[in-house]
Image (cartoon, rainbow, N blue to C red):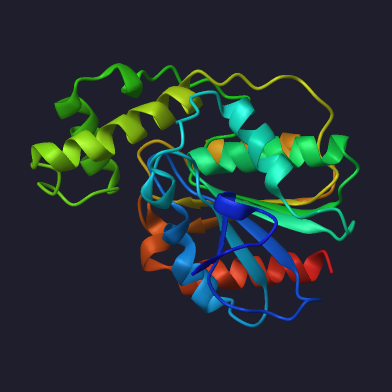
Amino acid sequence: MSNVATGGRWLKTFHPAPDDAPRLVCFPHAGGSAGWFSRLGAELAGEVRLSAVQYPGRLDRLRDGLVDDLCVLAELVSGALDVEDGRPVSLFGHSMGAVVAFEVARRLRAASVPVAHLFVSGRVAPHLRRDRDVHLLTDDGLVETMEHLGGVRPGSLRDADLRALVLPVVRNDYRAIETYRCEQAPPLSCPITALTGDDDPITGVADAREWAVHTDAGFTLEVFPGGHFFPLQRWGSVAEVVRRGLRGTA
């Protein structure tokens, strides 16, 4: 894995691809890192120029300040993307990352940068309010939530030092998504594909279908067996959805 030259610390790439390959930028979930998309990068190696966003405050960006305002985060990511050549870029976000990707798509539109396709995974449509206050829970409550969603193995966060490293990042990201408010704006002019697990406790199929109101260029819903982190068991199938979506916008 290496830094993408223009994105610097913001963007990580996993496999080389031809210069003319479709470009896909991926956005991880709350508490997640760019490496979460390494399997997807392997599935699409040689076909797609996949890079993933490394949010500040984690791993190699541990000394960079956390950002707890989702729109500020989207603005920072938008400025780090290599889009000056005017070529289209597609975006893929999971959970919190889906909303970050959506807000980046809005900012790219405002800058007249073409977005070919938006893939949103494991997240209700951004205009739907879900009054959850996970970021206000105790440390034990936060860990319980993470375990319930399948983000960490039960018991893996018992160590106090590990908690001190992980939980501030997770709490920060939950604060960002839970205080986010979707401002009214015209629908995007790129297709949207929503992906969700049929047993996701926080993203029902009907809520995922609501993403359709945010595009005037076509909407597809893909439902997979599994819970909130269904991609971990189904990266091959997710990659095929991406291939179909990118072919549709070629």
- Image vertical order of residue 219 relative to residue 136, above or below: below
* Residue drawn at the location 48% of the way across and 62% of the way down: 37
Percent x, y for residue 43?
Answer: 52, 77
Task: Describe residue 208's horizontal placement relative to residue 110 as left or right.
Answer: left
On the question of residue 126 being in view, the answer is no
The residue shown at (34%, 28%) is 171
Expressed as whole percent of the image width and height from the top left, the position of residue 199 reads: 36, 48
In this rendered view, identify the residue nearer to me: 183 or 129: 183
Q: Quadrant of residue 46?
A: bottom right
Q: Nearer the viewer, residue 26 or 165?
A: 165
Residue 44 placement (x, y as % from top left): 59, 76
Say left or right for 131 vs 248. left
Please report the residue visible at 48 percent of the width from the left and 42 percent of the height from the top: 95
Camera-nearest residue between 236 and 208: 236
Residue 217 visible in the displayed image: yes
Q: Residue furthest front?
A: 63
Residue 11 horizontal/vertical position (percent): 59, 55
Which quarter of the rendered picture does the C terminus lie within? Answer: bottom right
Drawn side of residue 247 relative to residue 226, left or right: right
The answer to which of 67 and 41 lies nearer the viewer is 67
